[in-house]
Amino acid sequence: MSNATLKELSVRLAAGDCSSVELTQDFTSKINNLGKELGCFITVDAERSLAQAKAADARRAAGDAGPLTGVPLAHKDIFCAEGWLTTCASRMLSNFVSPYDAHVVERCNAAGMVTLGKTNMDEFAMGSSNETSHFGPVRNPWNPETVPGGSSGGSAAAVAARLAPAATGTDTGGSIRQPAALTGICGLKPTYGLVSRYGMIAFASSLDQAGPMARSAEDLGLLLNVMAGHDPRDSTSLERPVEDYNRDLEKPLQGLRIGLPKEFFAEGLSADVRRTVEAAVAEYRKLGATVVDISLPNMGLSVPVYYVLAPAEASSNLSRFDGVRYGHRAAEYTDLLDMYKRTRAEGFGAEVKRRILIGTYVLSHGYYDAYYIRAQKLRRLIAQDFAAAFGQCDVIMGPTSPTTAFKLGEKSADPVQMYLSDIYTIAVNLAGLPGMSIPCGFDGGGLPVGLQIIGNYFDEARMLNVAHQYQLATDWHQKAPGGAQ
Ligand code: GLN
């Protein structure tokens, strides 16, 4: 049962083949075994999950079920969930029980979905390997010596290991797409503003966006249908008509123009990833697509621009963690200032401190114009490159990540190497565009490779169509790591 997709579970529940309680028990017992070994979850609470499952079964019996009523999922621990420990994988929030639900959690609950637990992640979503978590690393189910990617590594590993049929994630510079690629699952970062950030612990507010992680494009669409929608509590949430993101799944791809940016296939791309992504593009040609060579000339600036802007916003967002209202507070201190200092010194890990220092520096008087303002100007140029490219093509494709999963510890001593893991994903956040990753093959060592599909603003339905047609013709998305079944 735990190998079924969201779509299949929805059909089985509707047919009365299983109950939500049975499903939930199935997943929670798997989480207690394999989930512990892999470090996927920070918090599980089987009683709470079962209570939700019972309510979902009652709702179905009363004839009041929607497509996902009774279907379980896991939430990244960046989302506030009422009554749940919500830590953002930090020591700072290691004692924080949220008094309210994030918009995303509220929407999933309203749809009747069952929360299986809160997934592990990089501390405050800063990282690409899930090694910065205060609660220890997550292991990749394809090879436990390797990382699952980050920062949504717990969500990705849980879905890959069949511990949850789907999960929520957030993506500031690649944190849905890169772990999806490294664990062989699907993940979608929507257009900025499509999913409300209310109750999602802020990292870099102009880049953060929540999205679905699951095992097929169709499942991503089902979950996005629940997650998206206007919310007046987030001033950047867009007011748009409600859409069915799966409405175009069955459209043939005849005439689709795929743009391949030359910058995505340059130095630094592993030979295995290149070969696999090129094979996926060849499959798309068979499906009737044409390929256009394009260029995104300012791509090379996206990592440096991001590492000015994201830390700047983070330094401001994280200033709220001061030990006064909630979260960790140092046990001993002499006065208020000393309390702040000790609390923050104890409560934040090394990577978070590095970002706060960089952010405070680039925003400081005398450096603001040289770094922050310049980075904002370059951000606009990067967005303009995409606008020009979409004059020539309908979607852009390339690798999601330059390599497959790397070994635990391999990049943790060198932040710049770690930052380069997101070289193909970050520009998409800077431009506010939607992007997704789907599995498209394996490297020589049997580790999954992700194909990135980037769409124009609000083109989620088209992207899901493009991904779904590939998944009808291939079976990479159905491969499971050994032992997951
Ligand atoms: N890896 C990037 C970072 O460390 C992106 C993280 C994210 O998308 N949350 O900032």
Image (spheres, rainbow, N blue to C red):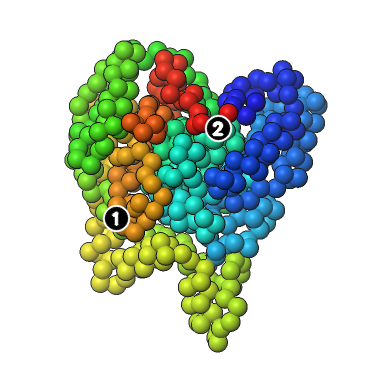
Q: Is residue 191 left or right of residue 88?
A: left
Image height of 141 relative to 251, above or below: below
**Cα distance, mark 1 to mark 2?**
34 Å
Q: Is residue 299 visible?
A: yes
Image height of 45 relative to 330, above or below: above
Q: Which residue is mark 1?
A: 416
For the residues bearing labels 1 and 2, Cβ distance under 8 angstroms = no
Within 10 Å of disc 2 (Cα), the crowding (few <14, some 14-19, many 20+) is few
Image height of 375 relative to 454, above or below: below
Within 10 Å of disc 1 (Cα), the crowding (few <14, some 14-19, many 20+) is few
Which residue type does callout 2 highlight? Gly
| Quarter of the figure with residue 363 | bottom left
Quadrant of image for the N terminus? top right
Q: Is residue 212 left or right of residue 280?
A: right
Ligand 1 under 8 Å from disc 1 Cβ: no
Disc 1 vs disc 2: which is toward the camera? Answer: 2
Q: Nearer the viewer, residue 315 or 270?
A: 270
Quadrant of image for the C terminus? top right
Q: Nearer the viewer, residue 153 or 69?
A: 153
Disc 2 is placed on an element classified as: loop
Q: Which residue is mark 2?
A: 483
Which residue type does callout 1 highlight? Val
Image height of 305 relative to 111, above or below: below
**Of label 1 and label 2, which has the lower sequence position?**
1
Q: Nearer the viewer, residue 58 or 19?
A: 19
The residue positioned 66% from the left and 47% from the top of the image is 44
The residue positioned 39% from the left and 34% from the top of the image is 447
